[in-house]
Image: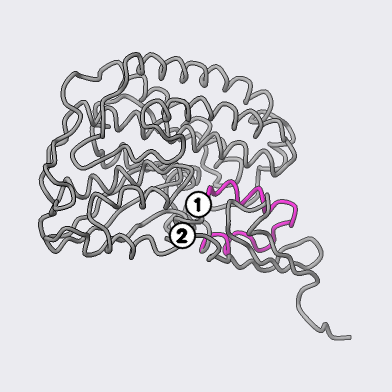
Amino acid sequence: MAKIRDFDYEYFIGPQHPGATGNMSYHVWAEGDTIIKIEPNLGYLHRGFEKLTELRHWIKNFPLILRICVPEPDINEVLYAMAIEELNEIDVPERAQYIRIIVLELARLSAYLLYFGGVAGTIGLYTVPQWTIGDRDYILDLFEELTGGRVYHIYQTIGGVRRDIPEGFKERVLKTVDYLEKRLKDYDNLFFQHPIFEKRAKGIGIVDKDAALRFSVTGPNLRAAGVNYDVRKKEPYLIYDRFQFDVPDMYKDGDTYSRVMQRRYEFEESIKIIRQAAADMPEGPVNIKIRNPFEYRVKEGSVYVKLESSKGEYGFYVVSDGGVKPYRLHVRGPSFSHGLQLVRHIAKGTNIADISMILFSLDVCPPDAER
């Protein structure tokens, strides 16, 4: 007897579901418990960030663009500021650049903690997200002290940062990263070296080197496939070339296990960078003065700037016509290629029980794809 349809089951994961990375959904078709097709579905979040920036003064876009990636919003602020500074040929004070790097690396640690908890939760290790959310709060305490906000900071500005760090802030930063470094031993025992995690994560969701390059995979997902490329090392921005840190390259299998472990060891490298930035930070101004920010104009031209985010290479293409508002802004984030194109490639043949773990291991940020 001929089959009426070529699948047995139809599933919807998300948009409000702990098995999806935020407010997006995945339409899944399966034969038995084996996935034969998956279709990502966007449109459940705020959209149109790029177009909205054209309607606002240059300075007024800072509170808007950071919402393009909520777990790590500071990357958007820094990139936007870098683009304006390059177009207007602004030299950012050295002290501000050190502060920017501390903020960026703290944001990376914060994003990785969310990531570790999310992956662990997909296989039932629920203690891990309880720990990581709690430990992330220590980083958010630092952001609140520095900027007044725990998630959205609106701290970066044209020509530097809005204000200097408070007295004793560097010491509190160092105390926090010392704690997090020690905490990694607990995470190793509970999660990274757990036999259930290793058994569940190895050999699933494989993205080999060729596929990674073909689908424009970047960041830790690319490095876990055996391509040791990190923007901070290969094309340094700000003052990253002054710091000593490594890009871990011990994982090359491109599976879920490799992606998670890649980030575990990159976590330690971010701590190294923060310590150096705090120790070497010079005295001096932290910004340039703008007489009237609402009449601020950016020279006519276009520029592309990029940096290394926790999720991969992140870029801003900004066009100015010489006016008080951007003429065009386009965001090149990693989540579009990782969460939409790549998922379709690697999900086929996957057991339905493994798909959430694979999705979380790719570290997708839905608003980055919607933008």
Please give the range of residues in magenta. Answer: 341-364
Pick the residue in front: 68 or 312. 68
Is 29 within the magenta? no
Secondary structure mostly seen in magenta is helix
Pick the residue in front: 273 or 230. 273
Q: Which quarter of the image is occupied by the C terminus?
A: bottom left
Q: Which quarter of the image is occupied by the N terminus?
A: bottom right
Point out residue 136 in the picture as x, y percentages from the top left corner: 53, 30
The quarter of the picture where residue 155 lies is top left
Point out residue 223 in the picture as x, y percentages from the top left corner: 45, 43
Q: Give the CA separation, mark 2 to mark 1.
A: 7 Å
Compared to residue 6, the image places residue 79 above or below, namely above
SS class, disc 2: helix
Residue type beneath disc 2: Ala
Q: Mark 2 = which residue?
A: 369
Is 342 within the magenta? yes
For the point 30% across and 42% down, the residue is 78
Near mark 1 (Cα within 10 A), the count class, few <14, some 14-19 or many ≥20, is many
In this picture, residue 264 sits left or right of residue 164? right
Q: Identify the mark at residue 71; answer none if there is no mark.
A: none
Compared to residue 226, the image places residue 351 above or below, namely below
Residue type beneath disc 1: Cys
The quarter of the picture where residue 277 lies is top left
* Mark 2 touches mark 1? (CB < 8 Å): yes
Pick the residue in front: 187 or 135. 135
SS class, disc 1: loop
For the point 17% across and 47% down, the residue is 293
Near mark 2 (Cα within 10 A), the count class, few <14, some 14-19 or many ≥20, is many
Q: Mark 1 = which residue?
A: 365
Point out residue 331 in the picture as x, y percentages from the top left corner: 34, 57
For this orientation, the residue located farthest to the right is 1
